[in-house]
Image: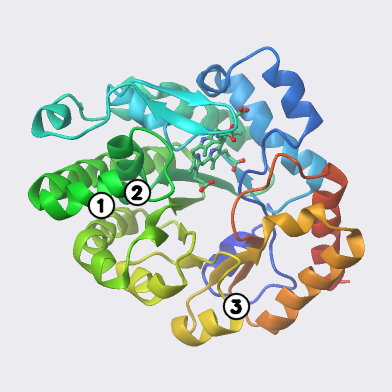
Amino acid sequence: MNDLILRAARGLPTPRPPVWFMRQAGRYQASYRKLRERYTLPEMVRHPEVAAEVTLAPVRELGVDAAILFADITTPLYGMGVELEIVEGKGPVFARPIRSVEDLKALRPLEAERDVPFILEAIRMLKEQLEVPLIGFAGAPFTLAAYLVEGGPSRRFLQVKTLMYKEEALFHRLMELLTENMAHYLQAQIRAGADLVQVFDSWVGTLSPADYQRYVQPHMARLFALLQPLGVPVIHFGVQTMGLLWEMKKAGGDVLGLDHHTPLPWAREVLGTTPVQGNLDPAVLLAPKGVIRREVQRILQENAGRPGHIFNLGHGLLPETPETHVRYVVDLIKEVSG
Ligand code: CP3
């Protein structure tokens, strides 16, 4: 078993940084697009043998050091009784956005074995085949709350912020509910065999540090506390989070995910010995190979060989990315160990 990522996530020395990519399974791959002609995204996720195959493809095709379970952050929401659709090129769109106590009451507690058995089955199937660690994941409470309250993707997040400021008690109840359910969902993934997990707080960067502290941090701290006894490393990731990094570290997680706006040396100063993941701009993979090489080398130099670095992008792979360029990044990282 290649355990580079597990060692790096613990801050232990590794001969080279492990590398994987957020959204490493997806439309940039010919093999994915072909499967996608036959199944919708929810169908792929609901068939464990298809989900397992899609999870394995980037490990085989790219040689990355970890697999990430193929699912979506919205997958457990179906199990909680939420109706939604994933619109291509846009993202999740919800039939009934949450705006009131009544809307909240319509959510039922997730029971992983009953509501998402296909996820646990896919993990069990993958564990029999994988020679690299398997990453489980969930959306963080704020990012899920943002989708649920906005009713879909948003740039300004005014609905969720308005609810947060005007109906603080209701907002906290929604956050508590999501925290408990995502903790249960992640615990079930770990028990089924996930070797580490990532919590995606993709949209939390829309908040000020003061609001993060008041409205989000206590829930994140609780989520991490519920995961800690299971003993697997937890990656805590968000986008546009440079101003929140210190507060995010205090909330918890073994590894902090950095987006490409955050200078890696600066993050190292703020975080001390806490391991980091990141942080190549996904758009660099659209550039010529010379630019890709320069940027990969820059990040490696910025980390300066310190233990506890997991190489990744600052956010997910773009559908427009040439597959050869993704492989090129993996090859560059592997060159480091010579
Ligand atoms: O390879 C992997 O990283 C694992 C699979 C994965 C998916 N979604 C599959 C997917 C993961 C980890 C996610 C997480 C996810 N989903 C996040 C957090 C990460 C991030 O990007 O910040 C978010 C915000 C979502 C919500 C979501 N789902 C969006 C914004 C989209 C894209 C819509 C589009 O068409 O561009 C989705 C759909 C989605 N999730 C796809 C995949 C492969 C594309 C589906 C398709 O084939 O059409």
Residue at the spot of label 2 = 157
Q: Mark 3: which amino acid?
A: Leu
**Residue 200 x %, y %:** 45, 51
At 23% across and 57% down in the image, what residue appears?
A: 222
Task: Give the structural element (helix, strand or loop) at label 3.
Answer: helix
Say whether disc 1 or disc 3 marks the residue closer to the N-terminus. Answer: 1
Q: Is residue 305 visible?
A: no
Q: Does residue 25 sit above or below 78 in this rendering?
A: below
What x and y, as percent, mark residue 248?
36, 68
Quarter of the render that holds ligand 1: top right
Q: Secondary structure at mark 2?
A: loop
Residue bearing the label numbered 1: 161
Residue linked to disc 3: 264
Residue at 71% across, 74% down: 299
Query: How busy is the neighbourhood of tag 1: few (under 14 within 10 Å), some, or many (20 plus)?
Result: some
Callout 2 amino acid? Phe
Residue 282 sits above or below residue 50 on the image? below
- Distance in Å between CA atoms under marks 1 and 3: 30 Å
Mark carried by residue 169: none
Q: Would you say 332 lies left or right of 214 here?
A: right
